[in-house]
Image: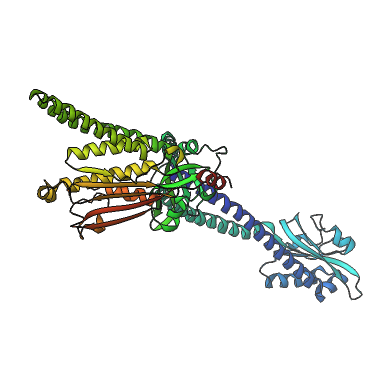
Amino acid sequence: MKVNLQQKIIIIALITTLLALGVSGLISRSIARGKLVQEIEISVMNSARAVAQMGDVIEGLKEEDPRRVQEQVSRVLLSSDNIEFIVVTDLEGRRYSHPNPEEIGRFFQGGDEIRVLETGEEYTSEAQGTLGLSVRGFTPIHNENQERIGMVAVGILSENVQKITAGLNYGTVLSIFIGSLIGLLGALILSKNIKKSLIGLEPIEIKTLYQKYQGLLDTVSEGIISIDEKGRINYMNQGGYEILQLENPNIQGKSVEEVFWENPLTRTLKGKKSEEHVTCFFQGKEIIMNTRLIEHKGKVLGAIGSFKDKKDITRLAEELTGARILTDSLRATTHEFSNKLQAILGLIQLGNIEEAQSYLLETQEKNESLLQTLGKNIRNVKLQGLLLGKIHRCQEEGVQLLIDEKSFVMDPENSTGDHQCVMTIVGNLVDNALEALTTGNFADSHSEDSEQKTIRLLIQESEKNIKIEVADKGPGISHEDAPRIFEKGFSSKGKDRGFGLHIVKKCVDSHQGSLKIDTSDREGTMFHITLPKRKNTNRTGENKGTE
């Protein structure tokens, strides 16, 4: 028979209650019986002393008159409810009184009278007499000269003592029974409460779920870390240990600030606000982390974060960006050169060979000039590819993308700037400007105006920051839309859009950069963005991470 958790709790609680009450009852009964016997001993001794001082008893012993002693003792017995017998003897142990008159004149039985007869000692004992087993007290009898002339034995039969203690036993058993019922009720309430807190699951089910989730979390390549309400780490999965490459994997119980520098988990805990794509550092390694606050019924229990090495994210982003750049560039280039080939073919068919040659040279010069400009000022090859693709894309739509001659971007090997973030911002802002110029009423009303269909781009990298400016002559941003343009999913161009500017804003915020917009319906829109560059990241991260 399988016993569930609730039944186990009830059985254990009931057994524990019974044992505790049983032991307590036995101890209490023993103490109570001891006190009862002590009271009986005091009572028989007091009665014995009183009888030993009675004049008729003393005179009866002196005159050797048992009748006189028996009459006095009988009167005492009639007035006492507790005493079972009173026996008076001379110094030889011959009885002068007894509940059974036939025993008068015979010697005292029990063997426990020797001490009082020989030494005159007062004491109590339990021994077998003619009436049965009894508890009795002995005291000597003295004459007026303080000479011992006999002794008194006052007793209570042991069976009567047992009857009194039987009442104690009944009370003890009743107390154990009532206590057991109370314990059973408490066990029922406790078991139901525990079962409810465990969502009705059995311990084996909880163990199985824990093992499954533990295995699931360990298969996740991202790092997962959780902290309690005091900021102490209470869990990190295997992916987290691998990303951080911890030499000592035992970090549970440590403050999260000892592991991560400028960690967002502490900010989430204090500010009670989740964060996304936040950069933090561990021993010189850049980590991108998302955090969530853990709450239950309004009480903060801690925070949880997922993180990845920024190098992995950058590598993946570069692969995706490179594929998109290549696709856009190939499509735009194919379309552009298809048009040019048709133009050349037409000139040749018309016999204008010189015009065809001139057109070919002009096209070659433009492409070489563009490539030289990009190669000279933009030293990040991936950014060059992005800009080239955007230029061709804009040409497809009849829009000019002009790159300012003052633009300059360092080689990634010599720069601490986030060029991947720059590519994200530039790509999204150019796409946004292109859509503004080529869609809606503005595109229809300015279809022949080449001056209006221009996008200007400036990227300037210095030692301290990277400045980006993207300007168009489009319709501008309306006052109604301006407060919401960075909201995820918001767009004036329809559903399933509105992610570009949201991504730009997140990228700027993650670097604590600045973003400013100048817009009007006549002048168009210009975005001004400044991204601070990191300073001595490796050294600072290492120092902080190993403190």
| In the displayed structure image, the side of residue 120 where residue 222 appears, left or right | left
Q: Quadrant of the N terminus?
A: top left
Identify the residue at image location x=28%, y=56%: 517
Residue 501 or residue 43, whichever sits in front: 501
Say which quarter of the image contains residue 149.
Answer: bottom right
Identify the residue at image location x=13%, y=50%: 442
Residue 417 or residue 63, whichever sits in front: 417
Say which quarter of the image contains residue 112.
Answer: bottom right
- Picture mark count: 0
| In the displayed structure image, the side of residue 283 where residue 432 appears, left or right | left
**Residue 110, x across and y down, in percent:** 79, 55
Q: Can the viewer see residue 50?
A: yes
Furthest toward the front, the residue is: 354
Say which quarter of the image contains residue 64.
Answer: bottom right
**Residue 532, x across and y down, in percent:** 42, 50
**Residue 466, x across and y down, in percent:** 39, 48
| In the displayed structure image, the side of residue 46 where residue 177 appears, left or right | left
Residue 126 or residue 65, whichever sits in front: 126
| In the displayed structure image, the side of residue 372 where residue 123 appears, left or right | right
Q: Can the viewer see residue 496?
A: no
The colour scheme applied to this rendered structure is rainbow
**Residue 13, x across and y down, in percent:** 50, 49
Residue 485 or residue 278, whichever sits in front: 485
Query: Is residue 155 placed above or below 230 in the rendered structure?
Result: below
Furthest toward the left, the residue is: 350
